[in-house]
Amino acid sequence: MLDPRWQRGLREVTRRGLHFELQAVPDQYVHALRLVEAFSDTTFVLLRAGMPADRTPEGMTFWRQGLARFAVCPNVLVKLSGLGTFTRRCRLDEWQPVIETAIDLFSPGRCMFGSNFPIEKLWTDYATLTSVFRASLSRYTPGEQQQVLHDVAARTYQPGTSQPVPATRDRSKTHQ
């Protein structure tokens, strides 16, 4: 992500008015933050709540500290998705602390619900997933819940309003 050639592509994403979905584990945050800060005109969506893979107390502290550094960057949103990816479970006692930490650091106006379905079918069903997610939002007002469950994603993805991005080169030719 710090390679200048790769960053040329990211500049094109920004030029086209698109956002970039960033997937990084806490060990990659230092580099990811350099990227986010260097591309302050780009909207980044940090996937899977920043991927708290290590659920030990030390691992969660490391994740939380790194997530707080992303939160000060106004061009970063958080997608609360794939929260059972590393534990292969969908449980309130595991998801709620992650969801609450992200929302408390970023605000409800910068966090959005997401899922990793159908992959999550390996350990849960969609009804359980949405039930656990909604229960994790219980301490927030209905308006804040609406932001997380709908408004931020609607504002970010603008369903029904996007137009296909025109091709910049003939993709029918093989490039070697």
Image: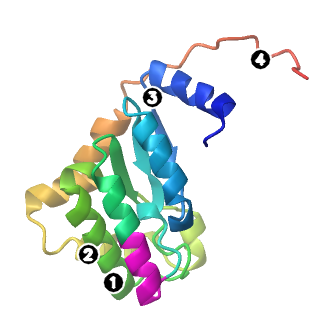
Mark 4 is surrounded, within 10 Å at the Cα level, by few (under 14), some (14 to 19) or many (20 or more) other residues, namely few
- Which residue is labeled 3 in the image? 18
Q: Earlier in the sequence, mark 2 or mark 3?
A: 3
**Residue 134 relative to residue 126: left or right:** left
Tell me the SS state at disc 4.
loop
Q: Main secondary structure of the magenta part?
A: helix
Q: Tell me, yes or no, whether the two marked residues, 1 and 2, touch with CB atoms within 8 Å.
A: yes
Residues rendered magenta in the picture = 55-64
> Reading the chain from its start, which is encountered first: label 1 or label 2?
1
- Mark 3 neighbour density, 10 Å: few (under 14) some (14–19) many (20 or more): some
Amino acid type of the residue tagged 1 in the rendering: Leu
Label 3 is placed on what type of residue? Leu
- Which residue was labeled with disc 2? 136
Left or right of residue 170, residue 95 in this image: left
Q: Position of residue 21 (x, y in %)?
A: 49, 45
**Inter-mark Cα distance, 1 to 2:** 6 Å
Residue at the spot of label 4: 171
Residue 52 position (above or below residue 45): below
